[in-house]
Image (tube, rainbow, N blue to C red):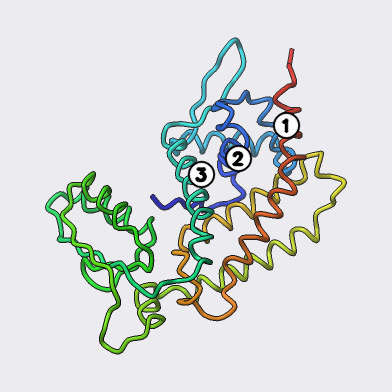
């Protein structure tokens, strides 16, 4: 599952971000409209824009609307919840891979080959899983990874009902390891540019942020904007060993910058959200 939100300033995008970062972990999947108005104030959304955005969220199947005790509530749907889980799992997986990426590569490749399956759904599910794990493609049904994910892929193949063959070793034929990486992951150059663009965006947003306004929710738009940008980049990053990447690869550096920025702003932002959740309207 590859998650992409086309309009990053949409009310649906904002609300899903807030549920994802601040609410779902506390078991909160529904908010009254009055509190949604308050939470979206730092994004400079007026009530008309919020109502229209919520309506589009309902139409797109990401939000549901119901009335309880005379008050309107909006909840995330099962489809939105799947997106939230994917978001959280992707971030968790990325963090786990950082030490692996930096620990030094033994020079061996994992090679995975599988035959096309008659069940298109199973084939699609397996292909999606292979990409999510971080394999690159060398040819039809032929995938490679510098990491040893043999046991993991055996489980995935069994779940999908796919027959696979796996090998671990050093390919021959005169091609260097870096050339193999560039063939299997041809978009590495663009990925480096995207990381550099994100690094610039982090610096610009921090420069414009008034530290004294964070406790009033000013950190929310920043976390939302940078969080989406970071997420969209890491979805496409196989986190190859540094030995297979161009010199001065920006990925780990930009990740540290984003994580540090996020952790410095989260406490005051959580406090802002909590104050709104604690308010009782008559």
Q: Residue at x 80, y 58 (%)?
A: 208
Quadrant for the C terminus, please: top right
Q: Which residue is mark 1?
A: 38
Above or below: residue 256 compared with residue 105: above
Could you tell me residue 192's position as x and y percent?
A: 54, 73
Q: Residue at x 51, y 38 (%)?
A: 56
Q: Earlier in the sequence, mark 1 or mark 3?
A: 1
Disc 3 crowd rating (10 Å Cα; few below 14, some 14-19, many 20+) is some
Q: Residue at x 70, y 55 (%)?
A: 260
Q: Earlier in the sequence, mark 2 or mark 3?
A: 2
> Going by the picture, which residue comes out furthest to the right?
212
In this view, the residue in front, 92 or 15, is 92
- C-alpha span from label 1 to label 3: 25 Å
Q: Which residue is mark 2?
A: 21
Q: Which residue is mark 3?
A: 88
Q: Earlier in the sequence, mark 2 or mark 1?
A: 2
- Mark 2 vs mark 1: give the one in front: 2
Could you tell me residue 188's position as x and y percent?
A: 46, 74
> Going by the picture, which residue comes out furthest to the left?
118
Could you tell me residue 176's position as x and y percent?
A: 37, 85
- C-alpha span from label 2 to label 3: 9 Å
Residue 100, disc: none
Could you tell me residue 102's position as x and y percent?
A: 53, 66
Disc 2 crowd rating (10 Å Cα; few below 14, some 14-19, many 20+) is some
Helix, strand or loop at mark 3: helix
């Amino acid at each position: 599952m590859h998650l992409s939100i086309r309009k990053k300033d949409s009310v649906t995008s904002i609300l899903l971000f807030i549920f994802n970062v601040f609410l779902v972990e506390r078991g909160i999947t529904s908010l009254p409209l009055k509190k949604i108005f308050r939470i979206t104030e730092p994004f400079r959304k007026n009530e008309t824009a919020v109502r229209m955005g919520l309506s589009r969220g309902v139409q797109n199947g990401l939000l549901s609307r119901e009335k309880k005790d005379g008050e309107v509530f909006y909840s995330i749907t099962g489809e939105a919840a799947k997106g939230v889980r994917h978001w959280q799992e992707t971030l968790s997986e990325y963090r786990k891979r950082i030490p692996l990426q930096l620990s030094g590569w033994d020079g061996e490749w994992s090679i995975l080959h599988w035959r096309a399956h008659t069940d298109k759904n199973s084939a699609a599910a397996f292909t999606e899983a292979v990409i999510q794990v971080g394999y690159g493609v060398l040819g039809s049904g032929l995938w490679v990874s510098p990491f040893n994910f043999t046991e993991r892929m055996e489980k995935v193949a069994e779940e999908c009902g796919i027959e696979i063959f796996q090998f671990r070793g050093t390919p021959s034929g005169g091609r260097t390891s870096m050339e193999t990486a560039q063939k299997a992951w041809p978009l590495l150059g663009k990925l480096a540019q995207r990381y550099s663009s994100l690094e610039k965006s982090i610096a610009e947003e921090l420069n414009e942020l008034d530290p004294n306004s964070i406790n009033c929710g000013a950190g929310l738009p920043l976390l939302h904007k940078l969080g989406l940008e970071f997420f969209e980049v890491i979805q496409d990053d196989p986190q190859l060993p540094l030995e297979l990447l161009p010199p001065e690869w920006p990925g780990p550096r930009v990740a540290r910058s984003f994580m540090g920025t996020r952790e410095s702003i989260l406490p005051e932002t959580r406090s802002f959200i909590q104050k709104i959740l604690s308010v009782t309207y008559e």
